[in-house]
């Protein structure tokens, strides 16, 4: 078997193993004009003759080297025409995009390049976008991620198949070295261009390729193979952990248009390996493309979610994201939640029944009756209802949310207590404290914190004549 057949068979094996494309489909080949992408274009062309694949050659002129870039675009166009392959040219404004979005040159160019390729694939009805990354590129990627302290996701490098915005990105040359691809071009008489910027050490990847990798290869002459093997090993392990993280999300979380709610007790029961991954997954759901979350932030969130002492807090996570913990629940959302309050209602004494409604979530019923009930009936009142001597109350009464400085006089001479402290003791979530009805008299004295605590005012006794019953009616919810 000659080298050409070896490349062809190897590429086909990759395509079959990873379901990169199927016979009769359209493939967009991303071609820069360098030896890697020119080898990809010609190999795909040879394969298309056997499998009836339809090819589109797509080239992006980033405009960063005006004279060279224009010449490269024309060269790729001519190469595609010689092979009878339709050609697509993209000419994005990299510098303008970089300035508008605060990105580095390489990052801006990469975003715009992929955006163009995906647009071409959609317009042409292509099933896949073929990229010319090879084993040396993979080794550089893994090493860069290692230097940044990435986990297994980063160390698994570039995936052979990846979905992005509904497009399938495939890398059928990852098993081959750059040397093998250059050799293929030379042997087949395929001309290619050399990007002069590849020799500049201004970019981290170039420095690593030109300086770091050669030095490391003095310790291991097969370093590229070793790094590719590491990527393949961790990729399958990372896939498994991703699946487990998705399952953990289903067990611990619920989502709606406002964000994601997490059960902290269920989170604490997860294996340590999944806790960080679950936090990152939740933040990814909230993030715009390009938003990053570093290890330190993820670890801070993880520790605070597990803390038994620090159970109510809000963290700013950057990019408009926040995390709020309220005892056994945590909420991940975009923006800070606005505190909710009840609309204050004030009313004078009125015999019979009065019903107040606070939106769709709460109702209260005030019922004045004459006659003293049996003492056992009063003792049987649950926390949802309170009884007062109607003649000893100072009207008008007001139902409202708590206010700063509110205090309640506790029953049987137990002194006073801040309403805020009582809500904390009852473990009422901060976001719900403004929705707890506080019933006050004309002097502003707190009579009842609905559902939680009665004050020491206006007790019903043997001298009472009329009784005011106040009850929370959750049937109105």
Image (tube, helix red, strand yellow):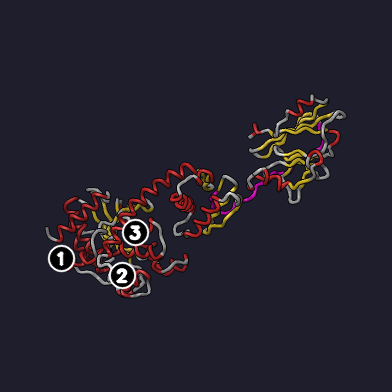
**Residues tagged 3 and 1 counted as in contact (Cβ below 8 A):** no
Mark 3 or mark 1, earlier in chain: 3
335 sits left or right of 418 in the view: left
| Label number found at residue 468 | none
Q: Residue lying farthest right?
A: 463
| Label number found at residue 157 | 3
> Image quadrant for the N terminus?
bottom left
Q: Kindly tell me whether residue 98 is visible in this rendering.
A: yes
> Image quadrant for the C terminus?
top right
Kindly report the distance in space between the C-alpha atoms of the residues bearing marks 3 and 2: 18 Å
**Residue placed at 27% from the left, 54% from the top?**
27
Q: Nearer the viewer, residue 314 or 466?
A: 314
Q: Position of residue 203 (x, y in %)?
A: 37, 71
Q: Kindly tell me whether residue 68 is visible in this rendering.
A: no
Q: Nearer the viewer, residue 314 or 39?
A: 314
Residue range in magenta is 331-350
Kindly report the distance in space between the C-alpha atoms of the residues bearing marks 2 and 1: 32 Å
| Label number found at residue 216 | 2
């Amino acid at each position: 078997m000659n080298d050409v057949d070896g490349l062809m068979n190897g590429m086909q094996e990759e395509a079959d193993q990873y379901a990169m494309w199927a016979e009769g489909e359209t493939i967009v080949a991303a071609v820069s004009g360098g030896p890697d992408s020119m080898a990809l274009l010609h190999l795909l062309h040879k394969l298309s003759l056997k499998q009836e694949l339809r090819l589109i050659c797509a080239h992006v002129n980033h405009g960063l080297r005006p004279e060279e870039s224009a010449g490269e675009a024309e060269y790729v166009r001519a190469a595609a025409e010689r092979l009878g392959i339709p050609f697509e040219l993209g000419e994005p404004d990299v510098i303008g995009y970089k300035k508008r979005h605060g990105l580095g040159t390489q990052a801006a160019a990469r975003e715009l390049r992929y955006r163009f390729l995906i647009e071409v694939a959609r317009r042409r009805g292509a099933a896949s976008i073929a990229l010319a990354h090879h084993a040396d590129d993979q080794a550089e990627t893994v090493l860069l991620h290692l230097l940044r302290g990435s986990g297994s996701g980063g160390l698994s490098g570039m995936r052979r198949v990846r979905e992005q915005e509904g497009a399938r990105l495939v890398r059928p040359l990852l098993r081959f070295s750059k040397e093998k691809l250059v050799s293929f071009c030379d042997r087949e008489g395929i001309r290619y261009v050399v990007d002069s910027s590849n020799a500049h050490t201004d970019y981290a990847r170039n420095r690593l390729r030109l300086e770091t990798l050669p030095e490391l290869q003095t310790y291991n002459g097969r370093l590229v193979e070793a790094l590719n093997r590491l990527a393949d090993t961790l990729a399958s392990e990372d896939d498994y952990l991703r699946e487990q993280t998705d399952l953990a999300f289903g067990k611990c979380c619920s989502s709606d248009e406002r964000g994601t709610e997490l059960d902290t007790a269920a989170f604490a029961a997860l294996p340590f390996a999944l806790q960080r991954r679950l936090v990152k997954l939740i933040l990814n759901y909230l993030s715009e493309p390009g938003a990053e979350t570093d290890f330190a932030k993820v670890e801070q969130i993880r520790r605070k979610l597990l803390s038994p002492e620090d159970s109510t807090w809000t963290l700013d996570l950057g990019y408009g994201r926040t995390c709020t913990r309220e005892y056994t629940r945590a909420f991940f959302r975009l923006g800070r939640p606005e505190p909710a309050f009840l609309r204050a209602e004030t009313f004078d004494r009125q015999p019979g029944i009065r019903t107040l409604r606070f939106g769709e979530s709460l109702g209260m019923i005030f019922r004045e009756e004459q006659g003293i009930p049996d003492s056992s009936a009063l003792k049987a009142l649950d926390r949802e209802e309170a009884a007062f001597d109607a003649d000893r109350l100072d009207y008008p009464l007001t139902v409202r949310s708590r206010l700063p400085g509110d205090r309640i006089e506790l029953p049987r001479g137990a002194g006073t207590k801040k309403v805020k402290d009582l809500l904390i003791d009852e473990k009422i979530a901060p976001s719900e404290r403004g929705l707890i009805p506080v019933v006050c008299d004309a002097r502003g004295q707190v009579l009842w914190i609905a559902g939680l605590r009665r004050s020491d005012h206006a007790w019903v006794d043997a001298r009472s004549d009329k009784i005011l019953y106040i009850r929370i009616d959750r049937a109105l919810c």
